[in-house]
Amino acid sequence: MQASEFLAEAGAISRFAGRFFSEGFRPRYEVQEFLYQCYVVGYKSLPLVGVTGFIMGMVLTLQARPTMAKFGAEAWIPAMVALSIIREMGPIITALICAGKIGSSIGAELGSMNVTEQIDAMEVSGTNPFKYLVVTRVLATTLMIPVLVILADVIGLYASYLGVNMKGVTSLSLFVNNIMNRLEFSDVVPAFIKTFFFGFAIGIIGCYKGYHSQKGTEGVGQSANSAVVVSSLVIFVIDLLAVQITGLLGLN
Amino acid sequence: MESVSPQVQEAPAQQPAASAEVVLEVEHLVKSFGENHVLQDFSLQLHRGENVVVLGKSGSGKSVLIKCIIGLLQPDSGSIRVFGEEVTGLEHQELDELRARVGFLFQSNALYDSMTVRENLLFPLRRHWINKTPAEEQAMVEEALQSVGLEQTQNMMPAELSGGMRKRIGLARTLILKPDIILYDEPTTGLDPITAREISQLILDVQARYTTSAIIISHDMNCVRITANRVALLVDGRCYQQGTYEELRHSTDPVVREFFEGAVPRA
């Protein structure tokens, strides 16, 4: 991709996001479709996010143990794993998994609707397709990804508790106390806030790619594929910006 | 499984009188995509109860014309008046009100594949704020399906239907709002000759039953022969010639003959 193409694409996505803000908060509100999209994005992603979170917590704990044991610092494992999960691993892994699952499905769905003229059909049926298809999906991903991240964090921490108990004995209350003593608001709040941006990026890029998909079967495939690639990349960029901003604010 | 529509006749209804009310008027329409000048000074009138077929080569701008009429595309210049109202300057809500009276049958049918046939039919009804009781909605769905001969498909998904059935359901979804004008975008493209003929007959059936006016975009000469009260030839972005099917078929103009030769043996 040439620099000019990249800039044109970035500009087009920004305009698309601008249209979301200008049209999204004016009536008519598509409440029913929004709730359905929350169900699709949130509820249907639960098993995948749950399994990923569980494995993430378990593996981090088991990997950390030998090194920590060398320094006699096994007691620090819960706090260390909790900090890694809450500050970074939970948000980024959940967002990437969702970019793969939700971003691709939005890209493919809207792409095939575009190719088969279903978006035009909506427009002639008295519906603003941008509101009905794009605004509902972007709002759903923006609000559901943070919920999924919290769930993945909790499941990951519980898996970490199980991991700690595989080689030793720790009660759940001790495990939780150990974490709570070292966890601060500045660990939780910035990490939580950035997940809204991750969700927004997944939704807006998936919708943009689908809405502007090229005609034909290949176009739909490309929409789904580039929705995942671009949103994953943007998630990392947002993560980098987030760490810089929290650093500047003295929250790191 | 596919049922055959009630056969009405294989010739369009009586030519509406030239004095019949003009329901749609396109004047000096211009539309370009970059350097591609698709429509250049295209003009056409549609009278009440009339089927006008716009005939033209692929890529000649036929679909662009009806997409401009329904407001999916904005023309560069020219005027489109539907029921005397200028379409190009309409606000979103006014455009929606107009769209409730002008049906559009998409070339690819554009059925929502995540919804059942019944939900597909209810979608335009509910979206146009037409408040009906569930019993009234059900009656309207059944009437629309019955008029295309597919009452039994209510709970089926579009993927379970054949090409011809999908076309009929697309038409039923248009008919549920009882439009005054229907715009058909290549209604027989991609169908086998028998199904194509059935769809053409269905278009006539709809015209007779609902007294709709229609613009039919086509390059299927059989469909043109069956459905057209009047044929308008779109060549180089302009309305090259107009007349009945028979008039154009016997034309000596080389451009007109090009369309008819090969398709139908000359009498």
Image (cartoon, rainbow, N blue to C red):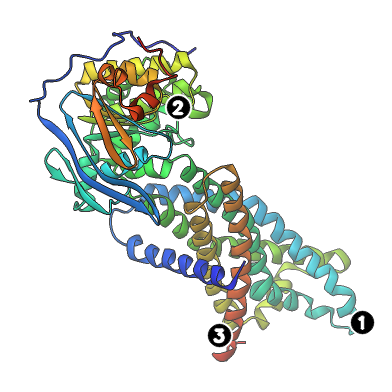
| Measured Cα–Cα span from mark 3 to mark 1 | 35 Å
The kind of residue on which mark 1 rests is Lys
Chain identity of mark 1: A
**Residue at 42% from the left image edge and 27% from the top image edge:** B117
For marks 2 and 3, give the one nearer the viewer: 2
Q: Which residue is mark 2?
A: B189
Q: Position of residue A219 (x, y in %)?
A: 57, 48
As drawn, A42 above or below A56: above
Disc sitting over residue A245 in the figure: 3
At mark 2, the secondary structure is loop
Which residue appears farthest toward the right when viewing the image? A70
**Do badges 3 and 1 share one subunit?**
yes
The kind of residue on which mark 3 rests is Ile
Callout 3: 10 Å neighbours few (<14), some, many (20+)? some
Assess whether mark 3 and mark 2 are in contact (beta carbons under 8 angstroms). Answer: no
Give the image quarter of residue B203: top left
**Do badges 2 and 1 share one subunit?**
no
